[in-house]
Amino acid sequence: MAHAKLASPGSSEPTFAERPLDTLPSDKGLQIDGISKRYGDVLALDGLTLEVAAGEVFGFVGRNGAGKTTTMRIVLGVLDADEGAVRFAGNPLTFETRRRIGYMPEERGLYPQDASRRAADIPR
């Protein structure tokens, strides 16, 4: 199995996160391995494991409270998982690697639609 080589400090080689996606191992992408997260007594994630291949577009669908946002916050480094690991192409995620992950949450605007309509004076 081929592994991406990390560049050493001061090297002219691109770091792992700077490498074009087509030069990464083709069988590896985002790997979520057994992540769990608790908020007090509430278990938000219970050992979630999934893999998204490099270059693949992936979407979560589920009811409110299913753990979609918590999962993405862990992947993006906003939250720490209580258990488990998140990797990209077999390597732990870094700030530079996370910059390459696109995320569009359900709430796309800064304000609720009604506030936006009022601000733009758009009738219902």
Image (cartoon, grey):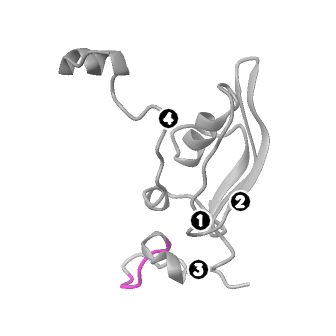
* Dominant SS in magenta: loop
**Mark 2 or 4: the one toward you:** 4
- Name, please, the residue furthest toward the front: 124
Can you give x and y, in whole percent of width and height, for residue 108 in the image?
40, 35
Helix, strand or loop at disc 3?
loop
Mark number displayed over residue 4: 3
76 relative position to 87: left or right: left
The kind of residue tagged 4 is Glu
Taking 88 as reference, is 119 left or right? Answer: left
Mark nearer the viewer, 3 or 2: 2
**Foreground: disc 3 or disc 1:** 1
Q: Range of the magenta residues?
A: 11-16
Task: Name the element at disc 2.
Answer: strand
Please name the residue that numbered disc 1 is placed on: 56
Q: Residue type at mark 3?
A: Ala
Which residue occupies 36% across, 79% down? 10
As displayed, is residue 38 above or below residue 36? above
Query: What is the crowding at mark 3: few (fewer than 14 residues within 10 Å), some, or many (at least 20)?
Result: some
Distance of label 4 from label 3 (alpha carbons): 33 Å
**Numbered circle sitting on residue 106:** 4
The Cα atoms of the two marked residues, 3 and 2, are separated by 18 Å
Distance from the alpha carbon under mark 3 to that under mark 1: 19 Å
In x, y percent, where is residue 103? 48, 48
Are dots 3 and 1 in contact, CB under 8 Å?
A: no
User: Mark 4: few, some, or many residues within 10 Å (few <14, many ≥20)?
Assistant: few
The residue under label 2 is 51
